[in-house]
Image (spheres, helix red, strand yellow):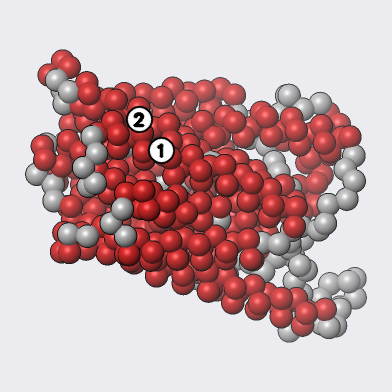
Amino acid sequence: MHIEPTAPAAAGPKSALEISTMRRATWHIVPFMMLCYFIAYVDRVNAGFAALQMNKDLGLSQAAFGLGGGLFFVAYVLFEIHSNLAMEKLGARLWIARIMITWGIVGALAAFAVGPYTYYLGRFLLGAAEAGFFPGVILYLTYWFPAEYRGRIVALFMVAIPISSLLGSPISAGLLSTDGLMGLRGWQWLFILEAIPAVLLGVLVFAILPNRPANAKWLNPEQRAWLTHRIEEERVRAKPVAHMSVWQVVTNKYVLALAVIYAGSSATSNALSLWQPQILKSFGLSTMQTGLLNGIPFAIASVTMVLWGRRADRSGERILNTAMPLALTSISLLATQFTSSLVVTMCLLSLVLVGTYAIKGPFWALSTDWLSASSAAAGIAAINTLAHIGTSGATWLLGYIKDQTGSYPMALLPLAVLTATGAAIVLVMGRQQSRDNEAAKATPRAPGGMPAAH
């Protein structure tokens, strides 16, 4: 099968129509989806701050807390692919609204856990409720933004993750101070109050989110026609992962490789979002000091993430722009073994998160470059789902190693190995793809310009 190179071509002069259309699409879609993802991530990781009170109240060991965090991703894995396929069938507006309202309700109910098992159940149900939101949005963005724009657009959307920790950390720390209000503990108010925006935004999604460019009343007819044609033009290009059944997509070598590559970034960002408050608290900080310091690495990462996404789009180079941040993350995680200084640890955690979040834009641009339109729904969900198997294991393992060794740096070692593995795989896959493209250039063509069957 002949595969055309899928990296964006060097950008030439753009028409006024293209510039106005993409600017309008960006402003109408990305900020709102960022806000939704901001709330999603706050609700996912606020257990990290709740743990400063909750673990003692519920009798949770570090391993038990980590197990609950892992169960979130077990549910995510079980339901994610089916959720994305449902969104493709039912439409983005209805399905994303359903996801947000459901996880808001489940998130609030987590406040009423009474022991380890109800805590486990709450985390599992939250994972089931949220499953499909992130890959659904990534799929949704492919309906609106050509490949040339996806690195920066995905980076802009995903900057909501570090911002959620930057802004959410002091908010979560402050909510813990409501301890005793109306007979509830601070961690219970934390879960309840941070769940309400998800439900409200879910209602807004259903009211204002267009399914496709053809439904966007805020685009004029000329803009709708141009964008629809441009997206359709890209849909018919040959891709490494062509039309396949769901099982074929899940077992495809490119999808499996992309899942392992992303597993390191996903595991690191989720594990640190959940555990970093406890790591910083171990230096003897107060709860509010922990909340304020916890946001610093995420602030640095949020700026770098956007800049790196722009760099990846301008160069059109996806492989190195994915591998380099993973290598930085791995080296920085390893370096935490050699310091007991809070300042040095903060610097290293900042570098870890810079690498972890910088990968997001170029990685998902690379992934959507490699997936055909017919395999995108299952492929994006499969990559995210399989990656979260690693995330689930790493979240539990971090708690287990901490219980066994008493050392957070030792507990971070599996993340260093996983990110180093991802960096190596993306370089190997990039080299393989280059060889395939070179070989394909010599492939004889059948009549009509299509590649001859092998």
**Marks 1 and 2 close (CB-CB < 8 Å):** yes
Can you see residue 51?
A: no
Task: Calculate the distance from the C-alpha at mark 1 to the C-alpha at mark 2.
Answer: 8 Å
Amino acid on which the number 1 mark rests in the picture: Gly
| Between 430 and 231, the one nearer to me in the picture | 430
Q: Indicate which disc, 1 or 2, sits on the residue closer to the N terminus.
A: 2
Quarter holding residue 436: bottom right
Residue at image x 69%, y 34%?
A: 26
Residue on which disc 1 sits: 295
385 relative to 31 in the view: left or right: left
Across and down, in percent, residue 192 comes to: 28, 26
Against 85, residue 370 (above or below) is below
Q: Quadrant of the N terminus?
A: bottom right
Across and down, in percent, residue 203 comes to: 48, 23
Can you see residue 341?
A: yes
Q: Farthest residue in the top direction? A: 182
Against 271, residue 184 (above or below) is above
440 relative to 283 in the view: left or right: right
Residue at image x 29%, y 25%?
A: 174
Quarter holding residue 114: top left
Quarter holding residue 190: top left
Against 43, residue 152 (above or below) is below
Q: Secondary structure at mark 1?
A: helix
Residue on which disc 2 sits: 170
Residue at image x 44%, y 22%?
A: 200
Q: Secondary structure at mark 2?
A: helix
Amino acid on which the number 2 mark rests in the picture: Pro
Residue at image x 82%, y 44%?
A: 229
Across and down, in percent, residue 186 comes to: 20, 26
Q: Quadrant of the C terminus?
A: bottom right
Across and down, in percent, residue 424 comes to: 53, 74
Against 171, residue 371 (above or below) is below
